[in-house]
Amino acid sequence: MEKIVIRGGASLKGEVEASGAKNAVLPLMCVALLTSDEMTFHRVPALRDIRTTKQLLLQLGVRLDDFTPGTLRIKACEITDHTAPYELVKTMRASVLALGPLMAREGRADVSLPGGCAIGARPIDQHLKGLEAMGAEIQLDKGYVIARADRLRATDFTFDLKTVTGTENLIMAASLAKGTTVLRNCAVEPEVGELIHVLNRMGAAIEGAGTETLVIEGRDRLHGVVHEVMPDRIEVGSYLIAAAITGGDVTVTNSRPDHVSALLDKLQEVGLQVDVGEDSVRVRSNGPIAGRDVSTDPYPGFATDLQAQYMALMSLAQGTSVIRENVFENRFMHVQELVRMGADIRVSGRAATVRGVRSLSGAHVQATDLRASASLVLAGLAAEGSTHIHRVYHLDRGYDRLDEKLRNLGADVTREKDDIV
Protein backbone atom coordinates (compact mmCIF):
# COMPACT_ATOMS: atom_id res chain seq x y z
CA MET A 1 0.00 0.00 0.00
CA GLU A 2 0.97 3.63 -0.43
CA LYS A 3 0.64 6.81 1.56
CA ILE A 4 0.87 10.46 0.60
CA VAL A 5 3.32 12.63 2.52
CA ILE A 6 2.83 16.40 2.44
CA ARG A 7 5.27 18.92 3.84
CA GLY A 8 3.04 21.93 4.30
CA GLY A 9 3.58 25.64 4.08
CA ALA A 10 3.91 26.34 0.35
CA SER A 11 1.50 28.76 -1.32
CA LEU A 12 0.16 27.08 -4.45
CA LYS A 13 0.61 29.09 -7.62
CA GLY A 14 0.10 28.42 -11.31
CA GLU A 15 -2.32 26.66 -13.64
CA VAL A 16 -3.83 23.20 -13.49
CA GLU A 17 -6.04 21.56 -16.11
CA ALA A 18 -9.25 19.89 -15.00
CA SER A 19 -9.58 16.19 -15.73
CA GLY A 20 -12.68 14.54 -17.14
CA ALA A 21 -15.48 14.06 -14.63
CA LYS A 22 -15.51 10.71 -12.86
CA ASN A 23 -19.24 10.96 -12.15
CA ALA A 24 -19.92 11.61 -15.85
CA VAL A 25 -17.64 8.89 -17.23
CA LEU A 26 -19.09 6.06 -15.14
CA PRO A 27 -22.68 6.29 -16.49
CA LEU A 28 -21.33 6.95 -19.99
CA MET A 29 -19.37 3.71 -19.87
CA CYS A 30 -22.61 1.94 -18.96
CA VAL A 31 -24.60 3.72 -21.67
CA ALA A 32 -22.35 1.89 -24.15
CA LEU A 33 -24.33 -1.24 -23.22
CA LEU A 34 -27.33 0.22 -25.05
CA THR A 35 -25.78 -0.13 -28.52
CA SER A 36 -23.78 -2.68 -30.47
CA ASP A 37 -21.89 0.17 -32.15
CA GLU A 38 -18.54 1.42 -30.90
CA MET A 39 -18.53 4.28 -28.40
CA THR A 40 -15.42 6.46 -28.08
CA PHE A 41 -14.77 8.69 -25.10
CA HIS A 42 -11.95 11.21 -24.85
CA ARG A 43 -10.65 12.87 -21.66
CA VAL A 44 -11.18 9.77 -19.54
CA PRO A 45 -9.30 10.14 -16.22
CA ALA A 46 -7.01 7.41 -14.91
CA LEU A 47 -8.95 6.47 -11.78
CA ARG A 48 -9.57 3.39 -9.68
CA ASP A 49 -13.35 3.63 -10.26
CA ILE A 50 -12.78 3.69 -14.03
CA ARG A 51 -10.72 0.50 -13.78
CA THR A 52 -13.47 -1.15 -11.74
CA THR A 53 -16.09 -0.27 -14.36
CA LYS A 54 -13.82 -1.66 -17.07
CA GLN A 55 -13.67 -4.94 -15.16
CA LEU A 56 -17.47 -4.99 -14.97
CA LEU A 57 -17.89 -4.36 -18.70
CA LEU A 58 -15.33 -7.03 -19.56
CA GLN A 59 -17.26 -9.52 -17.43
CA LEU A 60 -20.40 -8.69 -19.42
CA GLY A 61 -18.58 -9.56 -22.65
CA VAL A 62 -17.85 -6.00 -23.80
CA ARG A 63 -14.73 -5.19 -25.84
CA LEU A 64 -12.51 -2.38 -24.53
CA ASP A 65 -9.62 -0.49 -26.10
CA ASP A 66 -7.79 2.07 -23.98
CA PHE A 67 -4.29 1.86 -25.41
CA THR A 68 -4.27 5.62 -25.95
CA PRO A 69 -4.10 7.47 -22.59
CA GLY A 70 -7.30 9.39 -21.96
CA THR A 71 -9.24 7.68 -24.77
CA LEU A 72 -11.53 4.71 -24.20
CA ARG A 73 -13.31 2.74 -26.91
CA ILE A 74 -16.16 0.44 -25.91
CA LYS A 75 -18.03 -1.98 -28.15
CA ALA A 76 -20.81 -4.17 -26.81
CA CYS A 77 -21.39 -6.28 -29.94
CA GLU A 78 -23.13 -8.82 -27.77
CA ILE A 79 -23.60 -9.19 -24.06
CA THR A 80 -22.54 -12.65 -22.93
CA ASP A 81 -23.14 -12.25 -19.18
CA HIS A 82 -25.76 -10.32 -17.24
CA THR A 83 -24.28 -10.28 -13.75
CA ALA A 84 -22.72 -7.39 -11.84
CA PRO A 85 -21.08 -9.38 -9.02
CA TYR A 86 -20.72 -8.42 -5.40
CA GLU A 87 -16.91 -8.36 -5.73
CA LEU A 88 -17.17 -5.33 -8.03
CA VAL A 89 -20.28 -3.61 -6.67
CA LYS A 90 -18.95 -3.62 -3.10
CA THR A 91 -15.93 -1.54 -4.18
CA MET A 92 -17.94 0.95 -6.25
CA ARG A 93 -21.64 1.62 -5.90
CA ALA A 94 -21.85 3.08 -9.42
CA SER A 95 -21.69 -0.51 -10.73
CA VAL A 96 -25.46 -0.52 -10.22
CA LEU A 97 -25.66 1.71 -13.31
CA ALA A 98 -25.43 -1.45 -15.41
CA LEU A 99 -28.95 -2.38 -14.25
CA GLY A 100 -30.95 0.01 -16.47
CA PRO A 101 -29.03 -0.62 -19.72
CA LEU A 102 -29.02 -4.41 -19.26
CA MET A 103 -32.78 -4.42 -18.69
CA ALA A 104 -33.39 -2.13 -21.67
CA ARG A 105 -31.30 -4.12 -24.13
CA GLU A 106 -31.36 -7.68 -22.80
CA GLY A 107 -34.43 -7.83 -20.56
CA ARG A 108 -32.44 -9.42 -17.77
CA ALA A 109 -29.93 -8.38 -15.13
CA ASP A 110 -28.52 -9.89 -11.94
CA VAL A 111 -26.94 -7.06 -9.96
CA SER A 112 -25.55 -7.28 -6.46
CA LEU A 113 -27.11 -4.99 -3.89
CA PRO A 114 -24.54 -2.30 -3.02
CA GLY A 115 -25.04 -2.60 0.73
CA GLY A 116 -23.89 0.12 3.14
CA CYS A 117 -21.55 3.00 2.45
CA ALA A 118 -19.02 4.89 4.53
CA ILE A 119 -20.95 8.14 4.07
CA GLY A 120 -24.38 6.72 4.85
CA ALA A 121 -27.13 4.51 3.53
CA ARG A 122 -27.67 4.92 -0.20
CA PRO A 123 -30.46 2.48 -1.12
CA ILE A 124 -31.47 1.68 -4.70
CA ASP A 125 -35.20 1.35 -4.00
CA GLN A 126 -35.99 4.20 -6.42
CA HIS A 127 -34.15 2.38 -9.22
CA LEU A 128 -36.19 -0.76 -8.58
CA LYS A 129 -39.56 1.00 -8.20
CA GLY A 130 -38.99 2.78 -11.50
CA LEU A 131 -38.07 -0.40 -13.34
CA GLU A 132 -41.10 -2.20 -11.88
CA ALA A 133 -43.27 0.67 -13.16
CA MET A 134 -41.75 -0.05 -16.59
CA GLY A 135 -42.86 -3.69 -16.40
CA ALA A 136 -39.84 -5.41 -14.90
CA GLU A 137 -40.30 -8.33 -12.54
CA ILE A 138 -37.83 -7.95 -9.69
CA GLN A 139 -36.84 -10.34 -6.95
CA LEU A 140 -34.19 -10.12 -4.27
CA ASP A 141 -32.23 -13.33 -3.82
CA LYS A 142 -29.09 -13.89 -1.75
CA GLY A 143 -28.06 -10.24 -1.91
CA TYR A 144 -28.78 -9.84 -5.64
CA VAL A 145 -31.41 -7.96 -7.63
CA ILE A 146 -32.85 -10.45 -10.12
CA ALA A 147 -34.67 -8.45 -12.80
CA ARG A 148 -36.50 -9.72 -15.87
CA ALA A 149 -38.72 -8.24 -18.61
CA ASP A 150 -39.70 -9.12 -22.19
CA ARG A 151 -39.35 -5.45 -23.11
CA LEU A 152 -39.59 -2.45 -20.85
CA ARG A 153 -42.61 -0.25 -21.50
CA ALA A 154 -43.22 3.46 -21.00
CA THR A 155 -44.46 4.79 -17.69
CA ASP A 156 -45.10 8.01 -15.79
CA PHE A 157 -42.89 7.77 -12.71
CA THR A 158 -42.18 10.22 -9.89
CA PHE A 159 -39.08 9.74 -7.74
CA ASP A 160 -39.81 9.88 -4.02
CA LEU A 161 -36.55 11.77 -3.58
CA LYS A 162 -33.84 13.09 -5.83
CA THR A 163 -31.29 10.45 -6.78
CA VAL A 164 -28.56 10.97 -9.37
CA THR A 165 -27.83 7.32 -10.15
CA GLY A 166 -31.54 6.47 -9.96
CA THR A 167 -32.33 9.18 -12.50
CA GLU A 168 -29.50 7.99 -14.74
CA ASN A 169 -30.53 4.35 -14.56
CA LEU A 170 -34.14 5.07 -15.53
CA ILE A 171 -33.13 7.48 -18.32
CA MET A 172 -31.03 4.73 -19.87
CA ALA A 173 -33.77 2.15 -19.39
CA ALA A 174 -36.44 4.40 -20.93
CA SER A 175 -34.30 5.18 -23.98
CA LEU A 176 -35.01 1.70 -25.41
CA ALA A 177 -38.41 1.15 -23.77
CA LYS A 178 -41.61 0.93 -25.80
CA GLY A 179 -43.52 4.23 -25.78
CA THR A 180 -42.96 7.60 -24.13
CA THR A 181 -41.82 7.72 -20.51
CA VAL A 182 -42.18 10.71 -18.19
CA LEU A 183 -39.82 10.92 -15.21
CA ARG A 184 -40.57 13.48 -12.49
CA ASN A 185 -38.55 14.89 -9.57
CA CYS A 186 -35.36 14.01 -11.42
CA ALA A 187 -31.86 14.99 -10.32
CA VAL A 188 -30.51 17.94 -12.32
CA GLU A 189 -26.77 17.58 -11.73
CA PRO A 190 -24.55 18.45 -14.73
CA GLU A 191 -23.53 14.80 -15.01
CA VAL A 192 -27.18 13.88 -15.66
CA GLY A 193 -27.29 16.54 -18.37
CA GLU A 194 -24.13 15.09 -19.88
CA LEU A 195 -25.73 11.65 -20.06
CA ILE A 196 -28.84 13.08 -21.75
CA HIS A 197 -26.71 14.98 -24.26
CA VAL A 198 -24.80 11.83 -25.24
CA LEU A 199 -27.97 9.72 -25.47
CA ASN A 200 -29.63 12.28 -27.74
CA ARG A 201 -26.55 12.23 -29.97
CA MET A 202 -26.91 8.42 -30.06
CA GLY A 203 -30.43 8.83 -31.46
CA ALA A 204 -32.49 8.95 -28.26
CA ALA A 205 -35.34 11.44 -27.91
CA ILE A 206 -35.12 13.06 -24.45
CA GLU A 207 -36.65 16.43 -23.62
CA GLY A 208 -36.28 18.48 -20.46
CA ALA A 209 -32.52 18.33 -19.80
CA GLY A 210 -31.66 20.51 -16.82
CA THR A 211 -35.18 20.31 -15.39
CA GLU A 212 -36.87 17.99 -12.90
CA THR A 213 -39.21 16.52 -15.55
CA LEU A 214 -37.92 14.44 -18.44
CA VAL A 215 -39.91 13.12 -21.39
CA ILE A 216 -38.25 10.16 -23.10
CA GLU A 217 -39.52 8.62 -26.33
CA GLY A 218 -38.19 5.08 -26.53
CA ARG A 219 -36.24 3.98 -29.58
CA ASP A 220 -35.70 0.54 -31.13
CA ARG A 221 -31.94 1.06 -31.36
CA LEU A 222 -29.21 3.60 -30.67
CA HIS A 223 -25.94 4.21 -32.52
CA GLY A 224 -22.37 4.92 -31.43
CA VAL A 225 -20.80 8.37 -31.03
CA VAL A 226 -17.48 10.01 -30.19
CA HIS A 227 -17.61 12.26 -27.12
CA GLU A 228 -15.25 14.33 -24.98
CA VAL A 229 -16.11 14.08 -21.29
CA MET A 230 -17.02 17.22 -19.36
CA PRO A 231 -14.61 18.58 -16.70
CA ASP A 232 -14.83 17.28 -13.16
CA ARG A 233 -16.50 20.00 -11.11
CA ILE A 234 -15.47 18.43 -7.79
CA GLU A 235 -11.82 18.29 -8.84
CA VAL A 236 -12.09 21.91 -9.99
CA GLY A 237 -13.53 22.93 -6.63
CA SER A 238 -10.89 21.02 -4.72
CA TYR A 239 -8.03 22.85 -6.45
CA LEU A 240 -9.70 26.21 -5.93
CA ILE A 241 -10.02 25.49 -2.22
CA ALA A 242 -6.37 24.36 -2.22
CA ALA A 243 -5.43 27.82 -3.51
CA ALA A 244 -7.53 29.42 -0.79
CA ILE A 245 -6.21 27.37 2.12
CA THR A 246 -2.57 27.96 1.15
CA GLY A 247 -2.95 31.68 0.48
CA GLY A 248 -2.11 31.02 -3.16
CA ASP A 249 -3.08 31.95 -6.69
CA VAL A 250 -4.37 29.09 -8.86
CA THR A 251 -6.16 29.01 -12.21
CA VAL A 252 -8.05 25.86 -13.21
CA THR A 253 -8.24 25.62 -17.00
CA ASN A 254 -10.45 23.60 -19.35
CA SER A 255 -13.21 23.81 -16.74
CA ARG A 256 -16.87 24.82 -16.45
CA PRO A 257 -17.12 27.68 -13.92
CA ASP A 258 -20.91 27.60 -14.07
CA HIS A 259 -20.85 24.09 -12.59
CA VAL A 260 -19.19 25.38 -9.40
CA SER A 261 -21.04 28.67 -9.04
CA ALA A 262 -22.26 27.88 -5.51
CA LEU A 263 -18.67 27.34 -4.38
CA LEU A 264 -17.42 30.47 -6.17
CA ASP A 265 -20.05 32.57 -4.42
CA LYS A 266 -18.92 31.19 -1.07
CA LEU A 267 -15.22 31.76 -1.81
CA GLN A 268 -15.92 35.38 -2.63
CA GLU A 269 -17.95 35.67 0.55
CA VAL A 270 -15.06 34.44 2.72
CA GLY A 271 -12.71 37.03 1.21
CA LEU A 272 -11.05 35.55 -1.87
CA GLN A 273 -10.59 37.14 -5.28
CA VAL A 274 -12.42 35.05 -7.89
CA ASP A 275 -11.94 35.68 -11.61
CA VAL A 276 -14.14 33.71 -14.01
CA GLY A 277 -13.29 33.15 -17.66
CA GLU A 278 -15.16 31.32 -20.39
CA ASP A 279 -13.53 27.98 -19.56
CA SER A 280 -11.29 28.82 -16.60
CA VAL A 281 -11.54 30.11 -13.06
CA ARG A 282 -8.86 31.75 -10.93
CA VAL A 283 -8.81 32.07 -7.14
CA ARG A 284 -6.37 34.44 -5.40
CA SER A 285 -5.79 35.05 -1.72
CA ASN A 286 -6.66 38.51 -0.42
CA GLY A 287 -5.43 37.94 3.12
CA PRO A 288 -7.24 36.32 6.07
CA ILE A 289 -10.22 34.04 5.42
CA ALA A 290 -13.51 34.80 7.18
CA GLY A 291 -15.64 32.05 8.67
CA ARG A 292 -18.93 31.64 6.81
CA ASP A 293 -21.74 29.10 7.17
CA VAL A 294 -22.69 26.71 4.40
CA SER A 295 -25.40 24.10 3.85
CA THR A 296 -25.10 21.30 1.31
CA ASP A 297 -27.95 20.62 -1.09
CA PRO A 298 -28.52 18.83 -4.40
CA TYR A 299 -27.34 20.76 -7.46
CA PRO A 300 -27.39 23.71 -8.01
CA GLY A 301 -26.82 24.04 -4.26
CA PHE A 302 -23.47 23.67 -2.52
CA ALA A 303 -22.16 20.21 -3.42
CA THR A 304 -21.92 17.63 -0.65
CA ASP A 305 -18.77 16.38 -2.41
CA LEU A 306 -17.08 19.70 -1.53
CA GLN A 307 -18.24 19.86 2.07
CA ALA A 308 -15.18 18.18 3.59
CA GLN A 309 -12.78 20.37 1.60
CA TYR A 310 -14.66 23.52 2.64
CA MET A 311 -14.50 22.40 6.26
CA ALA A 312 -10.71 22.15 6.01
CA LEU A 313 -10.67 25.76 4.79
CA MET A 314 -12.96 26.93 7.58
CA SER A 315 -10.70 25.28 10.19
CA LEU A 316 -8.20 28.08 9.46
CA ALA A 317 -10.72 30.90 9.00
CA GLN A 318 -11.25 33.82 11.36
CA GLY A 319 -14.33 33.31 13.50
CA THR A 320 -16.88 30.53 13.66
CA SER A 321 -18.76 28.78 10.87
CA VAL A 322 -21.54 26.19 10.88
CA ILE A 323 -21.55 23.53 8.16
CA ARG A 324 -24.80 21.64 7.64
CA GLU A 325 -24.89 18.37 5.71
CA ASN A 326 -28.32 17.90 4.12
CA VAL A 327 -27.54 15.16 1.58
CA PHE A 328 -25.88 12.28 3.47
CA GLU A 329 -26.43 11.41 7.11
CA ASN A 330 -22.88 10.29 7.91
CA ARG A 331 -20.55 12.61 6.06
CA PHE A 332 -18.50 14.03 8.92
CA MET A 333 -16.04 11.14 9.18
CA HIS A 334 -13.18 13.48 8.30
CA VAL A 335 -13.81 15.60 11.40
CA GLN A 336 -11.90 13.34 13.76
CA GLU A 337 -8.84 13.38 11.49
CA LEU A 338 -8.93 17.16 11.10
CA VAL A 339 -9.13 17.48 14.88
CA ARG A 340 -5.98 15.33 15.10
CA MET A 341 -4.28 18.07 13.08
CA GLY A 342 -5.43 20.77 15.50
CA ALA A 343 -8.79 21.83 14.10
CA ASP A 344 -11.54 22.88 16.53
CA ILE A 345 -14.72 21.19 15.28
CA ARG A 346 -17.80 20.00 17.17
CA VAL A 347 -20.48 17.88 15.52
CA SER A 348 -24.12 17.77 16.55
CA GLY A 349 -26.35 15.70 14.31
CA ARG A 350 -26.02 17.01 10.77
CA ALA A 351 -24.29 20.24 11.76
CA ALA A 352 -20.61 20.86 12.46
CA THR A 353 -19.46 24.00 14.25
CA VAL A 354 -15.96 25.03 13.19
CA ARG A 355 -13.97 27.55 15.21
CA GLY A 356 -11.02 28.74 13.20
CA VAL A 357 -7.53 28.19 14.64
CA ARG A 358 -4.25 29.98 13.89
CA SER A 359 -2.53 26.92 12.44
CA LEU A 360 -2.76 23.19 11.86
CA SER A 361 -0.03 20.68 12.62
CA GLY A 362 1.07 17.79 10.44
CA ALA A 363 0.04 14.34 11.69
CA HIS A 364 -0.61 10.76 10.64
CA VAL A 365 -4.24 10.61 9.44
CA GLN A 366 -6.49 7.96 7.89
CA ALA A 367 -8.59 8.55 4.79
CA THR A 368 -12.13 7.25 5.33
CA ASP A 369 -13.77 8.05 1.98
CA LEU A 370 -12.97 9.84 -1.25
CA ARG A 371 -13.86 13.43 -0.35
CA ALA A 372 -12.71 13.07 3.26
CA SER A 373 -9.32 12.12 1.81
CA ALA A 374 -9.26 15.35 -0.20
CA SER A 375 -9.95 17.42 2.92
CA LEU A 376 -6.92 15.86 4.62
CA VAL A 377 -4.74 16.69 1.62
CA LEU A 378 -5.87 20.31 1.77
CA ALA A 379 -5.29 20.50 5.51
CA GLY A 380 -1.84 18.97 5.02
CA LEU A 381 -0.94 21.60 2.40
CA ALA A 382 -1.57 24.34 4.96
CA ALA A 383 -0.28 22.56 8.07
CA GLU A 384 3.06 23.08 9.78
CA GLY A 385 5.32 20.05 9.41
CA SER A 386 4.62 16.77 7.63
CA THR A 387 1.26 15.09 7.15
CA HIS A 388 1.10 11.37 6.35
CA ILE A 389 -2.19 10.35 4.73
CA HIS A 390 -2.83 6.60 4.88
CA ARG A 391 -5.27 4.51 2.82
CA VAL A 392 -4.91 6.78 -0.21
CA TYR A 393 -6.68 4.27 -2.44
CA HIS A 394 -9.74 6.37 -1.58
CA LEU A 395 -8.11 9.36 -3.29
CA ASP A 396 -7.20 7.29 -6.33
CA ARG A 397 -10.89 6.52 -6.85
CA GLY A 398 -11.63 10.12 -7.83
CA TYR A 399 -8.53 12.31 -8.33
CA ASP A 400 -6.41 11.86 -11.46
CA ARG A 401 -2.66 12.31 -10.75
CA LEU A 402 -3.38 14.44 -7.68
CA ASP A 403 0.15 14.40 -6.28
CA GLU A 404 1.66 15.28 -9.67
CA LYS A 405 -0.73 18.18 -10.22
CA LEU A 406 -0.10 19.57 -6.74
CA ARG A 407 3.68 19.37 -7.24
CA ASN A 408 3.28 21.37 -10.47
CA LEU A 409 1.61 24.08 -8.38
CA GLY A 410 4.53 24.17 -5.94
CA ALA A 411 3.41 21.73 -3.23
CA ASP A 412 5.86 19.35 -1.54
CA VAL A 413 3.93 16.10 -2.04
CA THR A 414 5.30 12.56 -2.46
CA ARG A 415 3.95 9.01 -2.57
CA GLU A 416 5.74 6.55 -0.38
CA LYS A 417 5.39 2.93 0.62
CA ASP A 418 3.03 2.60 3.56
CA ASP A 419 3.91 0.08 6.22
CA ILE A 420 0.74 0.90 8.17
CA VAL A 421 -2.26 -1.06 6.89
Image (cartoon, grey):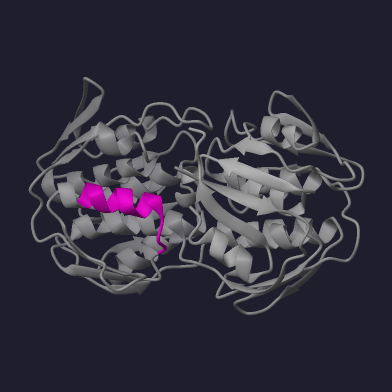
Residue 352 lies in what quarter of the image?
Answer: top right
Residue 413 lies in what quarter of the image?
Answer: bottom right
Judging depth in this view, the residue of 205 and 105 nearest the camera is 105
**Who's the residue at 19% across and 44% down the image?**
103
- Furthest residue in direction bottom, as rendered: 278
Q: Overall secondary structure of the magenta stretch?
A: helix
Residue 311 lies in what quarter of the image?
Answer: top right
* Image quarter (top left, top right, bottom left or bottom right) of the N terminus: top left
Judging depth in this view, the residue of 173 and 338 nearest the camera is 338
- Check if residue 288 falls in the magenta segment: no
Say whether residue 416 is left or right of residue 177. Answer: right
| x, y percent for residue 283 | 75, 68
**Who's the residue at 37% across and 70% down the image?**
70
Q: Which residues are magenta?
A: 45-57
| x, y percent for residue 194 | 42, 63
Image position of 78 with respect to 98: above or below: below
**Who's the residue at 36% across and 38% down the image?**
91
| x, y percent for residue 132 | 25, 33
| x, y percent for residue 206 | 34, 61
Image position of 93 with respect to 16: above or below: above
